[in-house]
Image (cartoon, grey):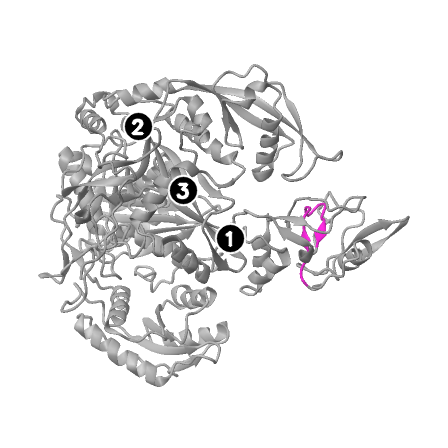
Amino acid sequence: MSTYLDIYQPSDRAAPVPSREVRKNENSIINSDRSGAKNREFPMRPAYGSKGNQILLWANYAEIKISDKVLHRYTISINPDVQGKKAERVIKLFLEHPPDNSLRQGIATDFRSTLLSLSELPDLSPCTITYFAEGEEPRKTSKKYTVKLSPHKSLDLSHLKKYFASTAFSEDCPSKDEMVQALNIFLNHSSKTNEGAVTVGTGKVFKKRGAPTQDLGGGLKAVKGFYASVRLATSRVLVNVNVCHAAFYGEENLLKLAMKYWERNEDNQIVESFLKRLRVHPKHLSNKEGKSVFKVKTIFGFATVKDGKVEGKELAHPPIVPQFAAGSENVKFWWCSQGKERYISVYEYFHLHYRITLQKPDVPVINVGTTEKPTYLPLETCKVLPNQVARTKLNPDQTAKMIQFAIGGRTPAKNARDIELHGFGAVGLSSGNNNLKRLGVGFSSGRASPSLIAVDGRVLETPKVAYGKTNYAKVFNGGWNLQHVKFSTSGEEQNWACIGVETDGKAKVTSKDLQEFKSKFQIELNKNGVRHTEPTRLKKEVFKVTDKKDLDDIFKDACSRKVILLIIILPQKLASHRYGLIKQFGDIGYGVATICIDGTQTFSPPYLANVTMKFNLKMGGNNQSVDFKETSLKFDETMIVGIDVTHPPPGSGVNTPSIAGMVASVDSSLGQWPAVVRRQERQRQEMVSSLQEMLESRLKLWSAKNKTLPKNILVYRDGVSEGQFKTVLEKELPLLRAACQKVYQTSYQKEKLPKITVVIVVKRHHTRFYPTKSGDADKKSNPQPGTVVDRGVTEARNWDFFLQAHQAIQGTARPIHYFVAHDEIFQDMKRQDAVNSLEHITHGLCYTYGRATRAVSVCTPAYYADLVCDRARCYPDETISIHQNLKDSMFYI
C-alpha cells in the first residue's frame, strides 16, 4: 500500500531553482586567497561538503533586496526608569504624540532601547509623557515620564551591500550584526504597531482575533502564530519565517481562571507564580456618576506577612496578613472614612464600600501594588485581559495537547503553504509594509510578494550500525530493530532486583505481574547477549510507599543485599516529584542505579527491548557501534565530549539553579558515556563555571581506562544561543585548555597537549526544509534522514551546516544546526576531507544513541548531556553530588 505524500508547491507553481549567483559566489569565496583572513574569530569553512546524493529543497526563507540608505540610531532613555510592558507603552505614547513631525514616518523602534530613523532627527529635546494604560483615559494624577533620544553610531547599508558583492575570503563588515538587528527592528515594527496583533518576545506575532486556538486546560489556551527573523547568508539578506505556537491565558474571570489551575496544583506558591505579572481589569470600579471605569492592574502576587514592612520603607499602619496567601476575611488594611480610622478586612471593605458580598472569602487575595505599598483585590472582582502570553511551564497533559495542536495532522507542506499564504503578511513581509518601502526593501527577482527560496541539499549515506563485530542491523528510514542481534558488549554480571511499588492503594502491582516481567525480561536479556544473575529478592516483592521513609527503607534493603541496579514497577505514571525522589535516593543517597517501569504497559518484546538497552548501559555495556569508515580520525585517540546547560523552567524559585552537564566517551567503541554534573554559580548563567574541573574528571577517567590520554578532544557544545558563540571562545575554551594543561603536565608521561575542536549544537532555531519532489521525501513528507544543507542559507566564510539525521515521528522535521567555533583537529586534513569527515562523524553519532533503535535528531554526546541536566532536576537544589558507586557510569540513561 503506497503512502500519500504531501509535497509543497508554491501557489504560482514556480519551479525550485536555487540562486545561481549565490552558488557562484559561494564557490568563489571558498576558492579565494585566505592569507588575509587568518585572524578571524571563527574557523574558515574549508570547503563545501561533497558526499551524498544531491537533492533540491525548499527552505522557509524569503530573500529581500536592501537599499544603500543610512540608518540613524538613537538610544531611548526613560526617566523614571521602567522596563517591559510599561516601557513599551511609554514609547508608544511618545510616538503617538511626538515632539516633532519627523517622528511620524520613516522610523522604527524595538520599544525597549533603540529607535531608528531614515533621516537625522532635528529635535532631540526631552519629551514629557503622561502615562495611561491602553483603553484608559489620562487622569490628573497620572504618572509622567520623560523620554530622551540620544544619537548613536549610524549604520550605512551600502557597507553591507559591498560585503555581499565581494568574493574575497578576507572581506568583512564589522557592523553586520548591528545591521541585522536594525533590519529586524524595521521588520518587527510593523507587527508591534499593528492593533490587530500581539507580539511575543523577538519576532513572534499572533493575531488577536481569528487565530487558530486550542484549549489546554488549567486556564490556558494554545494559539498559532508566526515567527520572523532577518538572517545573513552568502551574498544576500534572508528572512526566516516559521509557524510558531504559544500558550495564552484565557480571557475570563480571574477567580475562574485561578480555580482551573488550583484543580491541578494546590501549592499556593506555584499558583502565585502562575498569576504573577498578569494584567487584569477590576470590574467593580466606577466614577462619581456611577459609570464603570476601565483600569488595568498588574498582579504582583498574593498577600504576604512582609507587606508594608520593608525595612526603611515601613508604613505607619502596615496591613495585617496572618500568613502567605491569606483570604479576604483575614487580610486587613488601615482604612480612613468620614473621619474614622481603623483596620478593616478586604471582605468587609467590599461589602461596605461597593455593596459586594464576596462569595469566596477563603480564596487568597491578590496584591496589585508592591510589597512596600500593597493594594489588595479579591480574585472574583477581576477579569483577565485578553492576549496575554503565559510564561509558565506546561504540565505533561498540557504539553501533549500543545504538541497535538502544533503538529497533529499538519504535514510539512501544510506549514510551508501557511507561511507563504499567511505568514509573510502576518510578520509584515509584504508590499503593504510602508516602513520597508521607505527603507527601500524589495523582494527577489523584482517580485511584488515574497516567496520561499530553493536550496541545494545532500542525503548522506546511511551509517552502518554494528551489533558485535560482524552483525549489521538493517537500517531503513533511519530505524532498525533488535531481532536476531546481540549487543556489542555485555555489561558486568552484577546483582539486580525487581520490585513493585504501590503509592495510593488504588492501582496495584501483584506478585504475578512481577513474575511475568522477570521471566520475559530475562528471556530478552538472553536474546540480546546480556550476561546477568538471577534477580536478588528483597524482603518484600511489593512495597507500599506513602512517604520518603518508605523509599529510604527500600534502598537500605537493596544496599544491604549489594544490589547494583533496581527495577521498580509502578502501577501508574508517577508525578514528577515522586519520580524525582526515586532518582534522588538512587543516584545520590545510596548509589543504586534505577529503572522505573510503567506497570500499565503490556510487557511486549519491543517494550522489553527498550528496558534491556537501558539495563545493559547502566551495567557498563555497549549496545551498538557505528562504522566510521569515511574519516581518518582515530577514536582510540579522540575523546568526544558533550556539554549542555539547562535553566530553571518558568515559575521556578529564585534559588533554583541552572545546571551544567558533561559526558565524554571513554574508548573507541563510543558506547559508554559517563557523566559529571554541576550547578552553575548563578541562575540562568550560560557559560559553564566548573568547566575546568569537569573536563579534568573526564580526562582522568579516560586515562584510567586507556593508560594514556587522548590526542584529540572533539566537543559538541549544546545550550548556547547564536549571540554567545564568541563568549564560548572567550570564557570556555581557556578553561578546557587549563584542564588539559593541568592533567597532561601532571601525568606520568607528560604527554603533548591535545588538539581541541568545539562544535556548537543549535537546536532552538526556526530553519525548516521541505522536499521538492516525492522521490526525495520520507513517508511523513519530510526530507529523508541524513539530509544535510551547507549552502544557500549559510555564510561561506563560516563553517556550519544543517543536518536532519532522523525521521520525524510526526509534523515537520527540525534539522540541527552545527557551527564550528574552534578547530585544531580537522585543520591538518585536506580541506575537502575535513568537511566530509566532520559531517560523517556528526551523522554517525546520531546512530550511537544507546537506548533507541533509530537515529536521533541531535548527535549523541549533546543528547546525553541534555539527559544529564534533566536528571539533575530531580535532585535537591543544594546538592547534585553523584554517589561514588555511580559517578563513572551512565546513571542518567
Which quadrant holds residue 601?
A: bottom left
Query: Where does the magenta region start and end?
Result: 363-377
Residue ID for mark 2 = 444
Task: Identify which amino acid the numbered label 3 is placed on.
Answer: Met
Going from N to C along the chain, the mark reached first, 1 or 3, is 1
- Dot 2: element: helix
Pointer 3: residues within 10 angstroms few (<14), some, or many (20+)?
some
Q: As drawn, is 292 to the left or to the right of 818?
A: right
Asked whether residue 360 is drawn in magenta, I would say: no
Q: Are marks 1 and 3 in contact (CB under 8 Å)?
A: no
Q: Position of residue 19 (x, y in %)?
A: 23, 30
Mark closer to the observer (3, 2) = 2
The location of residue 115, given as percent across then percent down, is 51, 26
* Residue in view at x 25 percent, y 25 percent: 38
> Marks 1 and 2, Cα distance to the nearest angstrom?
40 Å
Relative side of 327 to 498, left or right: right
Residue 806 at x, y percent in the picture: 24, 52
Per the image, the residue denoted by label 1 is 392
Instruction: Name the magenta segment's main secondary structure.
Output: loop
- From the viewer's side, name the closer residue of 254 and 536: 254
Residue at 64% from the left image edge and 52% from the top image edge: 383
Callout in the foreground (1, 3): 1
Of the pair 769 and 160, the residue shown nearer to us:
769
In-image side of 378 versus 202 (left or right)? right
Pointer 3 residue = 687
